[in-house]
Amino acid sequence: MTPSQRKLAALSMDLKRVALSYHTNSMQTGLRFAEESMKKVKRIERRDLPDYIQKLLERVETVLGQEDKQKVAEDALMYSTILQNAALTNTINQ
């Protein structure tokens, strides 16, 4: 697994934790994992990633900043799954 794949996998897990926390109304926990997710997004080198992954990473902050926390939970779970799949495939060359 490449460094980029590891970073995407770690981000995927944090987004899944955001989704689960907000889904169970653990707002403080969800907020903490959302903060950690944003830190991880900023640490990912994007230039060699596929375009669709770059676009997803750009949208993470917008998704996590929504007022409706149930919508955040749904979107975070979707992003988590997409990023997990990307991390587990060999399409990332870094």
Image: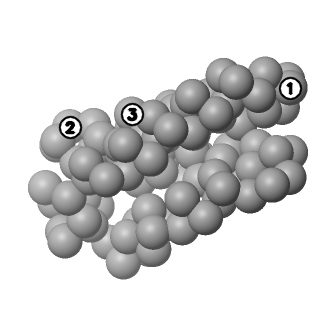
According to the picture, the residue beneath numbered tag 1 turns out to be 25
Q: Where is the C terminus found, in terms of image quarters?
A: bottom left
Residue at figure coordinates x 76%, y 28% from the top left: 27
- Nearer the camera: disc 2 or disc 3: 3
Percent x, y for residue 9?
39, 38
Q: Secondary structure at mark 1?
A: loop
Q: Badge 1 local density, few (<14 within 10 Å), some, or many (20+)?
A: few
Percent x, y for residue 30?
67, 30
Q: Badge 3 local density, few (<14 within 10 Å), some, or many (20+)?
A: some
Determine the CA span between mark 3 and mark 1.
Answer: 23 Å
Lateral position of residue 94 relative to residue 8, left or right: left
Percent x, y for residue 63?
65, 59
According to the picture, the residue beneath numbered tag 3 turns out to be 10
Image marks 2 and 3: residues in contact by CB distance under 8 Å: no
Q: Would you place residue 45 above or below residue 54 in this image?
A: above
Determine the CA span between mark 2 and mark 1.
Answer: 34 Å
